[in-house]
Image (cartoon, grey):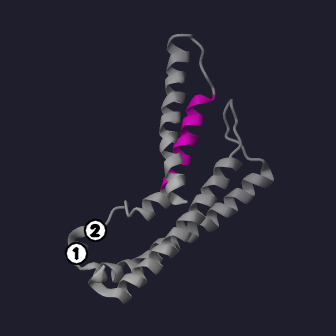
Amino acid sequence: MADLIGWFAMFLIYFMILVLLYDVFSDKVLGIVQNWTLEMAQFTLAAFYFLAGPKTLKDEGHVRLDLIYERLGMRGRAIIDSITIWLVIFYLAVLLWGGISSLHYSWVTHQRLPSLWAPSLVPIKILMNICVLLMILQCIAIFFRDVLRIIEGDAR
């Protein structure tokens, strides 16, 4: 599932580029200023950021402090990862808690961006919460993978 979501997220960058190119073309060539293009690009970038999270976790594409980590064997890395993943889960859980609260507020008040286009913030907040939940689930899967590596030792 994370691969499919990551594949979809990859194309959002191209969509964002097209929106920004349209904005420049519309403004410089046609002389028509668009009210929606910058905010659409910002929403697209936010969607990309959140949708790429689960895939980045799955593929271990995140940043690590390799000073000590690279010197350890597979089992040593798994021990460190199985402990530190709970810090990530805690961070994501707090983010999800705040995200749900923010989504509830946006839903109840019909919150919109204060601009001429005034798009609703509900869709991007729904996407954010779904993606944070997916990242938590991916972290739990990583924890169990690391536990299996600890049990199996350096054989893998």
- Where residue 82 appears, x then y in whole percent? 41, 80
Amino acid type, label 1: Ile
Residue found at the very far bottom of the displayed protein: 151
Contact between marks 1 and 2 (CB within 8 A): the answer is yes
- Residue 50 is inside the magenta segment: yes
The residue under label 2 is 65
Left/right of residue 66 with respect to residue 4 in the rendered view: left
- Whether residue 50 is visible to the viewer of this picture, yes or no, is no
Is 35 on the left or on the right of 82, as rendered?
A: right
User: Is residue 48 on the magenta stretch?
Assistant: yes
> Which residue position is annotated with label 1?
68
The quadrant holding residue 148 is bottom left
Query: How far across and down, in percent of the image, does residue 80 sit?
Result: 34, 80
User: Who's the residue at 80% across and 54% down the image?
Assistant: 108
The residue segment tinted magenta is 36-52
Viewer-closest of 108 and 4: 4
As rendered, which of 66 and 103 lies closer to the eye?
A: 66
The N terminus lies in which quarter of the figure?
A: bottom right
Q: Is residue 93 above or below residue 32?
A: below
